[in-house]
Image: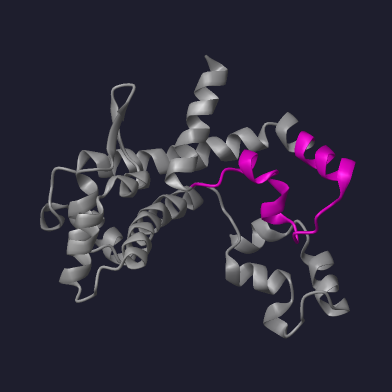
């Protein structure tokens, strides 16, 4: 059913840490100067992008890209870090994921949905305190309650970052450097000043061509 299918997509996006536009309150925020409009204006903008299909299109591309990566990682969950192909090893190295972290997650983070296997960063929540403590001990750190909790969250965040980055490949999105230019920060304009507001006005809705 369409409603159930959409709910499943939302749940999957949440688990992978992929912020889709329907959850963020409107696609316009990606390309504008982040000028929030109050009340009915904000609702009208959101309705416009829903009606023309652009919000659905970008959400579908982002989530499909993230799900494809999730499925690929799940298919390799039986392999150790050294057995992975070069591209996955480079990907994990890029996000600072160690072989020990991968070994812990690959046995806990794979689930089957409608006959397909997917890897979810939420699997970090199923890691036991003993497993995290052993990892900390190998790293030369004492396993305090706080440190165990922080290390678990760190592992989950690393894998979520992979899916967030993969989702952004599907849609051209201005990065922090581009946004700094759009807001005038690169040229010394401070937020809230007249200069900053002028930069925002000039570059409003120009994030797409600048990101390209």
User: Could you say where residue 124 lies in the image, as x and y percent from the top left?
Assistant: 32, 49
Q: Relative to 110, say whether 193 is above or below.
A: below
Nearer the observer, 28 or 25:
25
**Is 200 placed left or right of 160 in the picture?**
right
Residue at 87% x, 44% y: name it: 39
Q: Is residue 204 magenta?
A: no
x%, y% of residue 209? 66, 59
- The image quadrant that residue 194 belongs to is bottom right
> Residue at image x 25%, y 55%?
129
At horizontal 13% and vertical 47% (from top left) the residue drawn is 79
At x 65%, y 37%, the residue is 55
Residue 114, position in %: x, y? Answer: 34, 21
Q: Nearer the viewer, residue 54 or 20?
A: 20
Image quarter where the C terminus lies is bottom right
> Over which residues does the magenta segment extend?
18-47
Q: How many marks?
A: 0
Occupied quadrant, residue 16: top left
* Residue lying at the far front of the rendered structure: 145
């Amino acid at each position: 059913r369409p409603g159930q299918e959409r709910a499943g997509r939302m749940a999957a996006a949440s688990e992978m840490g992929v912020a889709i536009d329907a959850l963020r309150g409107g696609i316009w925020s990606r390309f504008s100067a982040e000028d929030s409009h109050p009340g009915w204006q904000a609702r009208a903008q959101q309705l416009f992008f829903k009606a023309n299909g652009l919000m659905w299109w970008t959400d579908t591309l982002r989530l499909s890209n993230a799900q494809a990566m999730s499925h690929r990682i799940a298919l390799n969950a039986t392999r150790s870090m050294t057995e992975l192909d070069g591209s996955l090893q480079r990907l994990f190295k890029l996000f600072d994921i160690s072989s020990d972290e991968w070994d812990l997650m690959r046995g806990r983070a794979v689930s089957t949905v409608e006959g397909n296997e997917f890897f979810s960063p939420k699997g970090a929540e199923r890691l036991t305190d003993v497993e995290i403590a052993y990892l900390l001990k190998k790293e030369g750190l004492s396993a305090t309650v706080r440190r165990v909790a922080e290390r678990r969250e760190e592992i989950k965040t690393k894998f979520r970052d992979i899916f967030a980055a993969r989702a952004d490949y599907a849609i051209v999105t201005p990065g922090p450097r581009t946004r700094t230019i759009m807001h005038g920060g690169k040229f010394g304009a401070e937020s809230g000043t007249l200069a900053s507001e002028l930069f925002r006005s000039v570059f409003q809705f120009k994030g797409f061509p600048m990101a390209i």
